[in-house]
Image (spheres, rainbow, N blue to C red):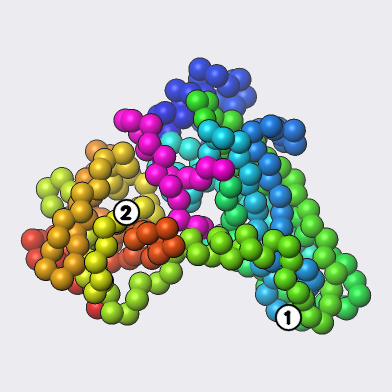
């Protein structure tokens, strides 16, 4: 999965960065003045309300031509990692990943984000916070950005918010709303989805009750499909089928096909279906 990354790093990055890649540990020095990316810790609310949920986000602003990565980076790269430094009793949830773009540089393809992305993280607050206090929230973010070369980095971020009995929306509320529109939702209950394994492809069958001219699948796990291969859509009775070429690195059968299916710019859904090993597709209702 890291082949293209190795090529670009070996040609352009110092030996220390190569060691970072080989060990799969983020040991690069902080890059507070990196001109290619700006990171910021932002909050959807302007205050901490005891016992309620605070919604935070790590905002990436990338220079043109640069990108960072989704939870499954594709053929190369590394997803961002957040090390939270929270006050006692604060509990951070998992990252809510907006669906990515497919970034093709044949014969490879990555899954990631260009220009700007917000990684949303919900944080549960303890009930015993005292009104009038101010709490500091901090995070160290490890990331990888790529263009013609790939550069690992890390950034220490912090945000202080007052404790109040109610909170209002922060100036970042529109960014959170726009990002939520790209976070995959559960599939509608009237959808029928099935998957089958053929000789050299998976076939994802969707019966959605509506017509669509666009279907794109992003796999949750690496090395299951060929990321750079075209995803052919064909018409099936009552729906559409998406043909996904199997990865050359897939050595054993998979029990389930998991990922994100995207219909258009603001309709993305989580998919988790069993894979039938016969020509008969097993359908989830």
Q: Quadrant of residue 235?
A: bottom left
Answer whether residue 201 is visible to the viewer in this image: yes
Residue located 19% across and 59% down the image:
241
Mark on residue 51? 1
Q: In the image, is 217 to the left or to the right of 276?
A: right
Q: Secondary structure at mark 1?
A: loop
When the figure is inspected, residue 241 is found, relative to residue 163, above or below; the finding is above
The single residue placed furthest to the left in the displayed view is 279
From the image, tell me which residue sits under label 2.
Answer: 216
Alpha carbon separation for disc pair 1 and 2: 39 Å
Q: In the image, is 162 to the left or to the right of 127?
A: right
Residue located 35% across and 33% down the image:
108
Q: Position of residue 63 (x, y in %)?
A: 61, 36
> Is residue 98 in the magenta section?
yes
Q: In the image, is 230 to the left or to the right of 54?
A: left
Q: Quadrant of the N terminus?
A: top left
Q: In the image, is 12 to the left or to the right of 275?
A: right
Magenta segment boundaries in residue numbering = 97-115
Residue located 34% across and 64% down the image:
271
């Amino acid at each position: 999965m890291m082949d293209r990354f190795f090529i670009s790093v070996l040609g352009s990055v110092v030996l220390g960065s190569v060691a970072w890649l080989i060990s799969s540990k983020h040991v690069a020095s902080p890059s507070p003045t990196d001109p290619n990316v700006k990171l910021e810790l932002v909050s959807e609310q302007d205050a901490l309300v005891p016992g309620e949920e605070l919604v935070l986000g790590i905002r990436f602003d990338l220079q043109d031509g640069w990108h960072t990565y989704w939870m499954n980076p594709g053929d190369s790269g590394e997803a961002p990692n957040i090390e939270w430094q929270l006050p006692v009793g604060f509990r951070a949830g998992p990252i809510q990943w907006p669906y990515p773009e497919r970034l093709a540089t044949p014969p490879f393809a990555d899954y990631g984000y260009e220009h700007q992305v917000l990684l949303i993280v919900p944080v549960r607050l303890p009930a015993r916070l005292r009104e009038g206090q101010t709490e500091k929230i901090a995070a160290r973010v490890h990331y990888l950005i790529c263009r013609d070369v790939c550069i690992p980095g890390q950034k220490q971020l912090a945000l202080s918010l007052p404790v109040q009995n109610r909170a209002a929306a922060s100036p970042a509320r529109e960014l959170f709303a726009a990002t939520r529109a790209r976070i995959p939702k559960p599939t509608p209950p009237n959808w029928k989805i099935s998957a089958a394994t053929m000789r050299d492809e998976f076939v994802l069958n969707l019966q959605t009750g509506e017509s669509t001219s666009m279907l794109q699948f992003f796999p949750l796990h690496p090395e299951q499909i060929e990321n750079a291969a075209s995803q052919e859509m064909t018409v099936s009775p009552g729906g559409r089928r998406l043909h996904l070429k199997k990865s050359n690195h897939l050595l054993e059968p998979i029990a389930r096909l998991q990922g994100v299916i995207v219909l258009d710019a603001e309709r993305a859904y989580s998919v988790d279906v069993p894979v039938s090993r016969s020509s008969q597709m097993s359908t989830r209702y």
